[in-house]
Image: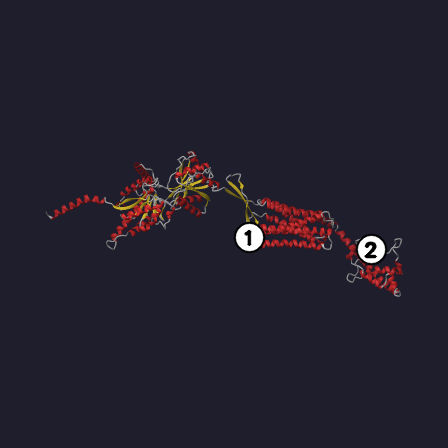
Amino acid sequence: MDPSGWLQVAFRVLLVCWLTVGPVLAQFRHPLPVLWIMPDGSGLGRENLTAGVIPAVRMALQDLEKQPPPMGNYEIQLQLLDSQCDPAKALKALFDAMWVGPRYLLLLGGVCPPVTALIARALPALSLVQVSFAASSPSLSNRRWYRNLFSTMPSDRVLNQAAVKLLQRYKWKKVGLVTKEGPGQSEMMKDLIRQLLKADIQLVATESFSEDACSTLKKLKERDIRIIIGQFDGDSASEVFCCAYRLNLFGARYQWIVAAGGPARWGLGLRHSGCTANSLLTAADGSIRLQIRQFSSKNTPGISGRTIQNYQNFYLRQLTQVRSEVSPLHSFAYDAVWVAARALSQVMEAVKHREKYSAHRNTTVSKEEAGKILLEAVKNTYFEGVTGPVFFRNGERMSSIELIQFQGSSGVLVGEFNTSTQQLRLIDNRLKFKGGGPARDQTLVLLQHRQVSIILYSIMSSAAAFIIFITLIILCVVIFNHKRWLLITGSASQDELLLLGIILSSSSVPLSGLNGVSLPDPTLEILCSARLWTLSVGHAVGFAVLFTKTWRVYSLCSIEQKTHRQHTSCVLLWVFLLDMLVLTSWQILDPLRWVMLQHSSENNPSDQDAIIRPYSEHCSSTNMDLWLTAVYGYKAPLLGLGCFVAWNIRTAEMAPPAVNSKLLTLCMFAVTLSSVSGVSGSLLASHNPPVQFCLSSILILSCNIFILSSLFGPQMLYVLCSSSELQQPCEAADEEDEDELSRFNQQLKIQSLQLDVQIETITMQLSDMSEPHWFLHGTGPKYAAAVGSQSTHEAQVYFHRDSEGKVSNLDNINSPEHVRRRLSVQLPILHHSYLPVIGGVSSSSSSLFANQEDFLVT
């Protein structure tokens, strides 16, 4: 056979081999061993859980066979590892499986939290990566301990995040928490408490129950908790809402937020003992449940080529064949298989590429290095699964949380929380509240600012301004008519001080009504000090003047006249100094500040779920009670003493006629009564500033009006009436008196000259008389000197009348029998006639002749 024939035979043989062997080689897939750790038939409910997940896992493996290369080149071979939900047994089974082989890089599954927590901490040392579909415990989110653990089911802490976002949306600041005791619930509760604290939301009460939920809810009701967060599974929902119906913890005043872990469904269809189905539906109506989304919201095919509807139909058919119940984890288990397959295929491709293109021949990748590549592959996973987009951030699955509101007999989707963007989206047209709006987290407190109204303040300020104006007019009259006022009252300076005290006390009225103005704090503090000083100083000055007047009258009636003026001036001074000392110490040591005062709450008649809490602003200091006690302590005895003295002079007759002791007594009692009533009324009406302002203002102004009308009214009428009518007659009378006194002075001077001559003549005539004769008749130089030494400053006019009552003739003035008598009266006359400074008897001493008691008539 020629060479060409051999070539044709060889080509045909190769073609046959390719046609026969090629399909066999194409169907070969590289096995990838994976440990599948699940509880298998040990414990209540675990058979159903495993059986409900197996159809989804088988479906994922079948869909992987249909994938093109490179995923289609590998086959996931699951090695079931029975954990029995016992950490020790599960860890022993893991070590045994790794010892026997083959070489494992990835673990799948893990639904028991204790087993998952123990094994996940050992994964870095074993160079393994675990992909779970039920690791939802918040504690497993700690990446320092569980950095090789990934779960396609979001952590339960995202439910807490959604709950906190919902609370913040409706500004609920006070909530209560009720949980059911069980594995995993304590960790979820602790995580919720941390997030509430971080969000500045007050957790008023935390209650847990195992069997009796009613006692737990009763405690929440006693503490008036309106927003209740429930962390319990669907099987306990009937029990909880039955107790809520009995305790009336439902309706417009309450809002339930159920944030149970996992994707469990509502369990309200079950009838609970003591409650009918309608009762349960009524209690649960309006409640909101937070649950993890089980299926994608998109109706487009995912990475497997299946739509959500196609997947559900196929899963239910497979589940019917095995006669098992639906597992809430089946969709997450399906995506977990896909995560494992994609990650392992990427690792194998990376290993092949490194072995093929490595600079060193026959190099192999170690298990540790392969584990690192697998860890990075899982972290970078991203595909569209049946549960939505599957990707991880910081080891946690990013997904969406659905907000389902129970309305009537079914649940309505009213919003969702995106764990990736941390955004809460609510569908307002679907969300319904029984009360027309969201429930309140507590009884609505309506703050009511109690302040003096503009009308009341205007009336009292106008009255105070009018009184101040009238007082200023009277003060001007007193100042410009000081001499005349002094003749009428005898105390013009004291009246001026009394008017000044009335002005100060009246000025405190408009200052005390400025409690609703918006002023800076330093200005308000100055305003507080101005109120205190004007009222206290005005009261002290006014009382001191009244007490001085009263004490002067009392001293005239009871003690010597020489000392009462000194005592009254001391009283006025000491009262003023004492008041200044207390006020200055108060201002320096503990100044007044503008503070807010909360009053007792009141019911709101228009809203039963709201109360009115009034508040007011007033001036206060740290030791307010101590300072008030000091002020009252020294003013109260003074007021009592003033009343006692005023009562004793009520019947006294006073001069000049313009002053009345009865009116003075009434003024003292008016000051005391207004002071006591003002202090008592201010303390009793401290919760109502308008009433307090009105009462104190009326007492102050009424007292000032009474003092003005009683003490200054009659005096003002006397001055005004006498000023116009008596001004000219008085001036004429004064001039006539001065002229008459001047003429009388001249006459006295002439008579004194004549008397000097006569005295010299008489002295010479009597010089020869013996000295005993002078002493016998009581005359002589010594006697004259004695008489001169006993003379007074009062001019004595001595007249001698005879038996018929006629005045003796002056022609016989030099007779001897008249000498002795003249000497006894002439020397005092000469004393006044020869005053060297004024030149005789002054015209200003006319008052000495006005009183008949100054003349001695015999």
Chain-order first, disc 2 or disc 1: 1
- The 10 Å Cα crowd at callout 2, few under 14, some 14 to 19, many 20 or more, is few
Residue 381, horizontal then vertical, whole percent: 32, 47
Front residue of 258/702: it is 258
Quarter of the rendering containing residue 235: top left
- The 10 Å Cα crowd at callout 1, few under 14, some 14 to 19, many 20 or more, is few
Q: Which residue is mark 2?
A: 856
Decide if residue 151 is in sight here: no
Residue 263, horizontal then vertical, whole percent: 37, 41
The figure's colour scheme reads: secondary structure
Residue 709, horizontal then vertical, whole percent: 68, 47
The C terminus, quarter of image: bottom right
Amino acid identity at mark 1: Pro
Front residue of 92/736: it is 92
Label 1: which secondary element: helix
Mark 2–mark 1 contact, CB under 8 Å?
A: no
Residue 256, horizontal then vertical, whole percent: 44, 40
Front residue of 724/814: it is 814
Tell me if 323 is positioned left or right of 272 in this view.
Answer: left
Q: Which residue is mark 1?
A: 522
